[in-house]
Image: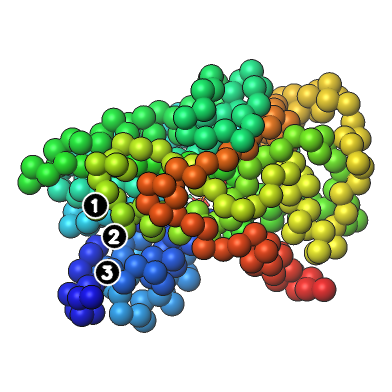
Amino acid sequence: MADSAQAQKLVYLVTGGCGFLGEHVVRMLLQREPRLRELRIFDLQLGPWLEELKTGPVQVTAIQGDVTQAHEVIAAVAGAHVVIHAAGLVDVFGRASPETIHEVNVQGTKNVIEACVQTGTQFLVYTSSMEVVGPNVKGHPFYRGNEDTPYEAVHRHPYPHSKALAEQLVLKANGRKVRGGLPLVTCALRPTGIYGEGHQIMRDIYYQGLRLGGRLFRAIPASVEHGRVYVGNVAWMHVLVARELEQRAALMGGQVYFCYDKSPYKSYEDFNMEFLGPCGLRLVGTRPLLPYWLLMLLAALNALLQWLLRPLLLYAPLLNPYTLAVANTTFTVSTNKAQRHFGYEPLFSWEDSRTRTIRWVQAMDGSAQ
Ligand SMILES: NC(=O)c1ccc[n+]([C@@H]2O[C@H](COP(=O)([O-])OP(=O)(O)OC[C@H]3O[C@@H](n4cnc5c(N)ncnc54)[C@H](O)[C@@H]3O)[C@@H](O)[C@H]2O)c1
Ligand SMILES: CC(C)[C@@H](O)CC[C@@H](C)[C@H]1CC[C@H]2[C@@H]3[C@H](O)C=C4C[C@@H](O)CC[C@]4(C)[C@H]3CC[C@]12C
């Protein structure tokens, strides 16, 4: 094994490094990538927690920047050996316009790819999403599917559409010559619904339950299963892919990998209760309390209200026609492609993932029980 001076020679860049997933990727890299000399964290909004990372042996460089600005991306990428592109606008609640979602998720990804080509960075890992596949607009279930399962991926919503376009760009760029003549090696990771410390939607649902007297009301049948994956395992897969991409370029280049672990298959609501239940919330109803047609009507009313109120304020509730359709469509993955291609095994067991998430919820407002 090379001594520490030789081993620490690589420069990594993580775009979106201050986000929910990005922060876990940053911390995982610092803990588990011994070859790091410099870790660049590029984000629109830098977190104050970055300061605590600057006391270690790895040079941590915080870069406030916008992936839609090509020159800012080029400056951040120049000299990096590996780019992990996790920056994105994750919006299925109508907060941002379709144009903005496309600008960030598609044009931003184009800028990252071109920056790699122009500056000579050879390895690019893209954080894609299960939504590149589905659920599709027809509500077809994807049951224990894998990377090769045939499925009619048809998207109308701007977010999944943008992720699909961006993923295509990344995979198509595999093999392009970068500055210096070497080939660009790319791959895309497709997490299912990520949960864990820092998950904003879980936080929102928790506080919604507190506002409703500790109760949540079942809207989705328990039989509708949604694949979920712990954020620490998604971060670990990113670290592993970035490490193995060079040695296994021929096998991994241009490939997609679902992110998976041992988290149980449950409905979105029942899965959330694994963490919210121990924190004092109760899910009312063994089956949906309202008929689906009424939920669709309420979702449509929310969409109409959002449109009417937009000139005055942002009204963006959890329930809208898209989120209802997604929540109500089974989407679970069962694959071992990441294990076969680069030896991935989840770093965190289901029990550990669950405990860590519960502790995070409990710490939110000192509700430890
Ligand atoms: N959360 C999930 O369940 C999930 C599942 C699958 C895939 N993903 C993907 O993982 C990635 C990270 O998602 P997340 O859940 O951590 O979301 P997040 O919103 O917490 O993090 C996204 C980060 O990107 C940054 N960002 C947004 N626009 C930017 C821009 N123009 N320039 C630079 N930085 C910008 C944000 O500031 C934020 O820090 C996204 O690409 C998302 O599509 C998320
Ligand atoms: C109000 C009820 C119907 C409630 O059950 C709605 C839940 C809804 C907000 C979530 C159900 C499924 C979620 C999505 C899924 O986990 C996968 C995603 C892909 C990722 O790339 C971004 C997030 C998301 C779209 C995620 C968003 C919240 C849900 C729609």
| Image quadrant assignment for residue 213 | bottom right
Residue 11, given in percent of the width and then of the height, sits at 24, 63
Q: How many marks?
A: 3
Residue 194, given in percent of the width and then of the height, sits at 58, 49
Residue at 37% in and 51% down: 342
SS class of the residue under badge 1?
loop
Q: Which mark is residue 246?
A: 1
Could you tell me which quadrant the N terminus lies in?
bottom left
Mark 1 Cα within 10 Å, few/some/many (few <14, many 20+)? some
Q: Is residue 98 left or right of residue 1?
A: right
Residue in the foreground of this view, choosing between 5 and 98 = 5
* Tags 1 and 2 touching, CB below 8 Å: no
Residue 12, given in percent of the width and then of the height, sits at 29, 60
Q: Mark 3 or mark 2: which comes first in sequence?
A: 2
Q: Is residue 343 left or right of residue 183?
A: right
Report whether the residue tagged 3 is closer than 8 Å to ligand 1: no
Residue at 39% in and 69% down: 32
Q: Compared with residue 150, is residue 95 higher up or lower down, i.e. above or below?
A: below
Reading the image, the residue beneath label 2 is 12
- Give the CA separation, mark 3 to mark 2: 10 Å
Q: Mark 1 or mark 2: which comes first in sequence?
A: 2
Q: Which mark is residue 35?
A: 3
SS class of the residue under badge 3?
loop
* Tags 3 and 1 touching, CB below 8 Å: no
Residue 128 seen in render: yes
Residue 340, given in percent of the width and then of the height, sits at 41, 47
Q: Compared with residue 269, is residue 31 higher up or lower down, i.e. above or below?
A: below
Q: Which mark is residue 335?
A: none
